[in-house]
């Protein structure tokens, strides 16, 4: 098909503004899937995505559309995640498109992540089509949203498409707008092959399935291809498109979005952002790739059963095949034994990785509280990056410590401006700017330590604004802070996995809160457990978990041994989630206690 | 082959507030039909029950003694017809003070019963009332004498600790009163608030004033110290007896020996299979009356589960696990299988092994569940 009849687009939206529902409707309207095949959130195939109502992985699907101009068009929809953690995934998808549908909720208006995604799309020179969704809602105010789009983003919203993805209203207009407004891909069929890898997944039978967007040239089975960054050569077994299931085709040409399989055993050979070219007649230069993604938060992942260490390593390796943004390296903890320090894009990403490891690989894991990366400048003039609080060098060799700050954008009804500022101030934030989006909604900008965002900023923000605030942030460099290491001792022994780096002014308060919290979390055991918080050698707080007095089933009724055994099984199951640290058994919540304090 | 026979009587005059055992209160209209069904089930098992030497019979409840004399007599006749009760067998009936009027005890003696287990629970009227018991402390003491006078060779009383309004001092006075009665056997059970009981509802509403844990522990310690000092050997975590007066029927549970249960909700363990009868009394009657099976569930524990059960049941007793008996039954060496678990538990001071076997320490008895759960296979 000539590129003139191809459109590659994605959908960008704040979470809950209806992106997945709109995608479902587009699939349905174009007959890509029959009503029988439709299930809600078709593109969110991962169990977790459906459960949480979010998109984690980029997905792609080809729609065939007979437009009003009489032409038959091939529309490639590349789905993108909406959460701030997955900005990296978004930018990968954007690079494979020429246009984007900007979905805004007709009742909610622009939110913080809408803005972040629009700016990304503009960076990629995409044609942006505003789509105002949920116009069926009684509180919908499309005109107000149009004004916001024009005033805040600076996009012409006069031709914004009004839809209700729920009822199906306006879906045809969206398709027409895609055909009319999104430019067809440019590309030279005769030029050497250049295709951008935007994703991949591992298939146990076919090897790595590479998701790509062809820019120039053609690709077909039998062709020898070269990965330009890794310099690996493979022979193509299959090429195909997304319907959204994989469907083989004879070849892919310029502007096409599809996949290839080439018996590739190692996902590392197919780096996302790399360029695929023809090994026989290669392109001169690769496409501009993606900037390397840098994890923002780290935590330790440890198997509850030490014998599961190898299984955890294998699982992380496999997971990384589908998630290049996941970093991990082995580490050892005195308390937890052998495990991995893992880097994530954000808290949601961390949560999802942990849940996938447990669900898909049957592991039971202990996660330590997430932390940011600190830059420790030492008295000898060297700098060390600290990804694990327990590794903070002794105070006497530290000259100063820097921590990452983010530029946070909060959008909130003007009634809550005071609460947001108060909270941000408390979280060591520095006020930057404030803008009225309309007479009732305000955008507030602060620079804040990332550690405070991880700690409880978002939860507090939501609760102090009754859920109205939306938040987005981006890294804004490192700044010096007066930070100290807070250690926790159980039975007089420091538990390295519970150490945290905190601001000196808040350290005593945090120490007290933490031991109190731990007292509530650590189940009573056969002996008394003193819990202490210390900074350096100074104990700043102490609590005690009293001993359990006894634990024995008194009676077995009339020979019903099964019931007795089930009770014991339940008790044993409960212990399975506990990690033995010295003589004390700690539940998972203990390691997260440092995060969840009021 | 020796066999235990358990007969369940799922009726009470009134449900105690802590009780989650299968029994119904005030269902007099079912007594006759239930007795008939019970006899029919026993007769149906006649082949097995006459081929084996039934050396323990245990009629439990509920409150077996709420049944009228004619029902008790009918059960006795049925046993004589269908069951080969061995000479010298232990034949226990559970009884509640306040339900022993008239000629019931004589009927039980005539049926062959030689042992009565009296549900006393406490010797403090305030505590008894708060637990929903139907008798006073004086009536309980009198019942023990009455039972003895009726010619029963063995009498046991059940006590509970950790009940609402109970104090360590009160519990100690109760132990003294129990030990002074003409009894050879005393059981002391800690209260557990079970789901679905009135106590659970009270607890959820914050209206159940239980003794604090320190007091409950003190009561546990008291029983463990007082009763052996007065001649009642602690032969199982909650059971104390004068030498030779241990409950042989209950020992079968702990020694992994076979027993057959009849009646609603009764459990059996025969040839490595555990079965349970339907718990609902009306359904039980209907099934048996229709000539059907009362059994609703069967389970044959896998070897790893069976070995764990064997271990945690045996560890409840003073004799503990015998390595020789374990090897004879399962063809496996106990320490080879559980060496690591035993080492860890011994390191925590919960168990002690010698060349012949493994037993709980005093600490291990207190934290029995920690020990027991350790033997279960990971699942």
Image: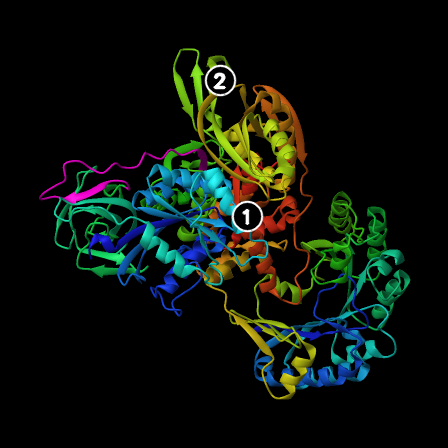
Indicate the position of residue B252 as horizontal and vertical percent values: 61, 65
- Residues drawn in magenta: A272-301
Left or right: residue B108 compared with residue A365: right
Mark 1 touches mark 2? (CB < 8 Å)? no
Chain to which the residue tagged by mark 1 belongs: A
The residue labelled by disc 1 is A108
Q: Which mark is residue B253?
A: none
- Answer whether residue A303 is visible to the viewer in this image: no
- Answer whether residue B71 is visible to the viewer in this image: yes
Please, is residue B362 above or below residue B105 in the view? above
Q: What residue occupies the far left of the structure in this picture? A: A280
Indicate the position of residue B157 as horizontal and vertical percent values: 78, 62
Chain to which the residue tagged by mark 2 belongs: A
Q: What residue occupies the far front of the structure in this picture? A: A158
Left or right: residue B37 compared with residue A139: right
Indicate the position of residue B86 as horizontal and vertical percent values: 64, 76
Mark 2: secondary structure: loop
Please, is residue B248 above or below residue A358 in the view? below
Q: CA distance from mark 1 to mark 2?
A: 50 Å
Q: How many other residues sit within 10 Å of disc 2, few (<14), some (14-19) or many (≥20)?
A: few
Q: Is residue A274 magenta?
A: yes
Indicate which label's residue lies in the foreground, 1 or 2: 1
Left or right: residue A565 compared with residue B327: right
Left or right: residue B159 compared with residue A487: right
Nearer the observer, B247 or A499: A499
Task: Check the picture and name the quadrant holding the N terminus of chain B.
Answer: bottom right
At x 19%, y 39%, the residue is A228
Q: How many other residues sit within 10 Å of disc 1, few (<14), some (14-19) or many (≥20)?
A: some
Q: Is residue A554 magenta?
A: no
Mark 1: secondary structure: loop
The residue labelled by disc 2 is A394
């Amino acid at each position: 098909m000539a590129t003139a009849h191809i459109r590659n687009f994605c959908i960008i939206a704040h979470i809950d503004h209806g992106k997945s529902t709109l995608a479902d409707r587009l699939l349905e309207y174009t007959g890509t899937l029959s009503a029988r095949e439709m299930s809600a959130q078709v593109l969110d195939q991962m169990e977790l995505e459906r459960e949480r109502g979010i998109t984690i992985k980029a997905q792609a699907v080809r729609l065939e559309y007979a437009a009003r101009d009489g032409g038959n068009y091939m529309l490639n929809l590349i789905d993108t995640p909406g959460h701030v953690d997955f900005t990296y995934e978004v930018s990968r998808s954007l690079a494979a498109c020429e246009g984007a549908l900007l979905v805004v909720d007709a009742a909610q208006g622009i939110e913080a992540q809408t803005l972040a995604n629009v700016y990304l799309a503009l960076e990629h020179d995409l044609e942006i089509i505003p789509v105002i969704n949920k116009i069926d809602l009684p509180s919908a105010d499309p005109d107000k949203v149009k004004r916001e789009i024009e005033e805040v983003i600076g996009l012409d919203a006069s031709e914004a498409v009004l839809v209700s993805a729920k009822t199906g209203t306006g879906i045809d207009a969206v398709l027409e707008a895609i055909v009319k407004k999104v430019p067809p891909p440019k590309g030279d069929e005769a030029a050497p092959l250049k295709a951008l890898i935007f994703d991949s997944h591992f298939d146990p039978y076919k090897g790595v399935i590479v998701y790509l967007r062809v820019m120039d040239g053609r690709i077909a089975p039998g062709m020898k291809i070269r990965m330009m960054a890794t310099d690996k050569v493979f022979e193509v077994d299959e090429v195909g498109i997304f319907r959204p299931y994989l469907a083989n085709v004879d070849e892919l040409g310029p502007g096409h979005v599809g996949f290839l399989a080439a018996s590739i055993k190692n996902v590392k050979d197919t780096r996302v952002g790399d360029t695929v070219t023809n090994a026989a007649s290669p392109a001169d230069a690769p496409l501009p790739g993606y900037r390397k993604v840098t994890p923002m938060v780290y935590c330790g992942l440890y198997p509850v059963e030490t014998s599961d260490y190898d299984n955890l390593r294998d699982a992380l390796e496999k997971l990384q095949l589908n998630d290049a943004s996941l970093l991990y390296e082995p580490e050892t903890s005195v308390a937890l034994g052998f495990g991995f320090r893992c880097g994530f894009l954000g808290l949601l990403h961390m949560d999802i990785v942990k849940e996938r490891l447990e669900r898909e690989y049957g592991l039971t894991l202990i996660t330590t509280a997430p932390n940011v990366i600190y830059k420790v400048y030492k008295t000898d003039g060297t700098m060390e990056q600290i990804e694990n609080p327990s590794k903070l060098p002794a105070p006497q060799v530290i000259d100063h410590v820097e921590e990452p700050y983010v530029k946070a954008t909060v959008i909130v009804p003007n009634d809550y401006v005071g609460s947001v500022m108060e909270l941000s101030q408390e979280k060591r934030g520095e006020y930057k700017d404030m803008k009225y989006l309309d007479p009732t909604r305000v955008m507030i900008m602060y620079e804040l330590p990332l550690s405070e965002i991880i700690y409880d900023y978002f939860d507090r923000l939501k609760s102090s604004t009754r859920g109205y605030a939306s938040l987005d942030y981006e890294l804004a460099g490192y700044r010096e802070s007066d930070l100290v290491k807070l250690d926790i001792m159980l039975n007089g022994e420091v538990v390295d996995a519970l150490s945290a780096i905190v601001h000196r002014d808040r350290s005593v308060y945090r120490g007290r809160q933490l031991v109190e919290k731990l007292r509530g979390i650590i189940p009573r055991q056969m002996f008394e457990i003193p819990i202490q918080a210390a900074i350096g050698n100074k104990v700043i707080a102490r609590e005690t978990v009293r001993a359990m007095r006894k634990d024995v089933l008194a009676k077995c009724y009339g020979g019903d041994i099964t019931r007795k055994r089930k009770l014991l099984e339940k008790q044993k199951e409960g212990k399975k989630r506990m990690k033995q640290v010295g003589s004390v058994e700690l539940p998972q919540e203990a390691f997260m206690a440092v995060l969840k304090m009021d | 082959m020796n066999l235990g026979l358990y007969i369940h009587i799922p009726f009470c005059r009134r449900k105690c507030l802590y009780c989650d055992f299968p029994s119904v209160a005030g269902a007099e209209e079912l007594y006759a039909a239930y007795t008939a069904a019970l006899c029919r089930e026993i007769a149906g098992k006649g082949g097995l029950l006459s081929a084996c030497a039934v050396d323990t019979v245990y009629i439990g409840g509920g409150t077996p003694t709420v049944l009228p004399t004619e029902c008790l007599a009918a059960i006795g006749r049925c046993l004589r017809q269908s069951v080969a009760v061995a000479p010298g067998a232990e034949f226990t009936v559970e009884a509640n003070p306040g339900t022993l009027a008239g000629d019931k005890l004589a009927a039980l003696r005539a049926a062959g019963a030689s042992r009565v287990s009296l549900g006393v629970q406490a010797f403090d009227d305030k505590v008894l009332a708060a637990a929903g018991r139907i008798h006073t402390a004086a009536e309980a003491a009198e019942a023990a004498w009455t039972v003895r006078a009726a010619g029963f060779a063995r009498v046991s009383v059940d006590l509970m600790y950790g009940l609402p309004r109970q104090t360590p001092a009160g519990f100690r006075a109760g132990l003294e009163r129990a030990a002074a009665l003409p009894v050879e056997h005393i059981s002391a059970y800690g209260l557990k608030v079970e789901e679905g009981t009135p106590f659970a509802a009270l607890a959820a509403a914050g209206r159940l004033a239980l003794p604090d844990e320190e007091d409950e522990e003190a009561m546990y310690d008291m029983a463990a110290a007082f009763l052996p000092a007065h001649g009642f050997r602690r032969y199982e975590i909650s059971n104390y007896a004068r030498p030779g007066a241990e409950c042989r029927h209950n020992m079968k549970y702990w020694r992994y020996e076979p027993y057959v249960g009849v009646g609603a909700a009764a459990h059996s363990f025969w040839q490595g299979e555990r079965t349970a009868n339907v718990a609902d009394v009306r359904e039980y009657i209907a099934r048996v009356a229709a000539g059907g099976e009362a059994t609703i569930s069967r389970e044959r524990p896998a070897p790893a589960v069976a070995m764990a059960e064997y271990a945690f049941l045996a560890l409840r007793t003073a004799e503990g696990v015998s390595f020789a008996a374990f090897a004879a039954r399962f063809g496996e060496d106990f320490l080879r299988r559980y060496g690591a678990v035993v080492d860890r538990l011994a390191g925590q001071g919960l168990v002690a092994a010698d060349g012949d076997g493994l037993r709980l320490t005093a600490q291990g008895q207190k934290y029995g569940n920690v020990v027991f759960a350790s033997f279960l296979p990971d699942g």
